[in-house]
Image: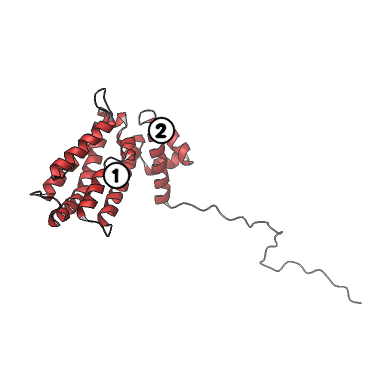
């Protein structure tokens, strides 16, 4: 009877034990995703601790990323604070844009909702940082305010113009009116920290009253 021999490995093929060498490489996150995660983490830490008390280590710990990875995307704490502020402005702008584009509402209803966005609690949580009004961050505040004005002015002017066309309000220049309202809103946010005689809520009510008077709206 012929003896059956055990077949050896085929040339060029490496034999593996079950489960051996089957681990998949760890998926890498896209750069923009990683940057967004850092900005989101920084926003949470800044909100909790304020700018002065926050460190880069706090941010990387919150984001669950390496210290060196932070510096791939940002120069330092001020740089990511700027990015977080710009991102927040963009989020608020999208809220306003959604209101302006909502179907089935009059221009006056849209305008009223847009003005109320300035009173959202989340805004005071961000703009209420005491450090944001300190001299070492004035240039950041100015840069963020400038971007906000550039983004919001055309949108608010269009909503005001629509309200004029439908006969809800009567202002001679929608663009100038929008400029006044945005400027007053920025001043309000810069000073929205409350005093012994004027609380945050008082500031908000004063701005709303100012806006209604500028637009000629009845109470």
Left or right of 60 in this view: 3: right
Q: Give SS at disc 1.
A: helix
Residue at 23 percent of width and 40 percent of height: 145
Q: Is residue 132 above or below residue 212?
A: above
Question: Which residue is nearer to you in this view: 120 or 28?
Answer: 120
Q: Residues within 10 Å of mark 1 (few under 14, many from 20)?
A: many
Of labels 1 and 2, earlier in sequence is: 2
Q: Position of residue 21 (x, y in %)?
A: 64, 56
Nearest the viewer among 162 and 151 is 162
- Residue at coordinates 31% horizontally, 41% vertically from top-left? 120
Residue 48, numbered circle: 2
Q: In this view, does 66 lie above or below 198?
A: below
Q: Where is residue 99 in the image (x, y as percent from the top left)?
A: 28, 53
Is residue 134 among what the camera can see? Answer: yes
**Picture residue at 21% right of the left edge, 34% below the top:** 206
* Residue 137 appears in the rendering: no
Residue beneath label 1, please? 89
């Amino acid at each position: 009877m012929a003896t059956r021999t055990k077949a050896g490995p085929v040339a060029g093929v490496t034999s593996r034990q079950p489960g051996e060498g089957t681990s998949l490489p760890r998926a890498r996150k896209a750069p923009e995703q990683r940057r967004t995660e850092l900005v989101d983490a920084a926003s949470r830490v800044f909100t909790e601790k304020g700018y002065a008390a926050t460190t880069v280590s706090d941010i990387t710990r919150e984001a669950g990323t390496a210290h060196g990875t932070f510096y791939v995307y940002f120069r330092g704490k001020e740089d990511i604070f700027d990015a977080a502020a710009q991102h927040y402005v963009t989020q608020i702008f999208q809220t306003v844009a959604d209101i302006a584009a909502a179907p089935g509402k009059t221009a006056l209803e849209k305008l009223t909702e847009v003005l109320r966005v300035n009173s959202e609690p989340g805004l005071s949580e961000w703009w209420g940082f005491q450090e944001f009004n300190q001299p070492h961050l004035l240039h950041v505040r100015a840069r963020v305010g400038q971007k906000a004005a550039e983004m919001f002015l055309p949108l608010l002017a269009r909503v005001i113009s629509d309200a004029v066309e439908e006969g809800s309000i009567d202002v001679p220049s929608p663009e100038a009116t929008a400029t006044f309202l945005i400027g007053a809103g920025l001043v309000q946010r810069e000073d929205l920290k409350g005093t012994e005689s004027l609380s945050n809520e008082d500031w908000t009510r004063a701005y709303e009253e100012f806006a209604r008077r500028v637009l000629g709206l009845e109470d």
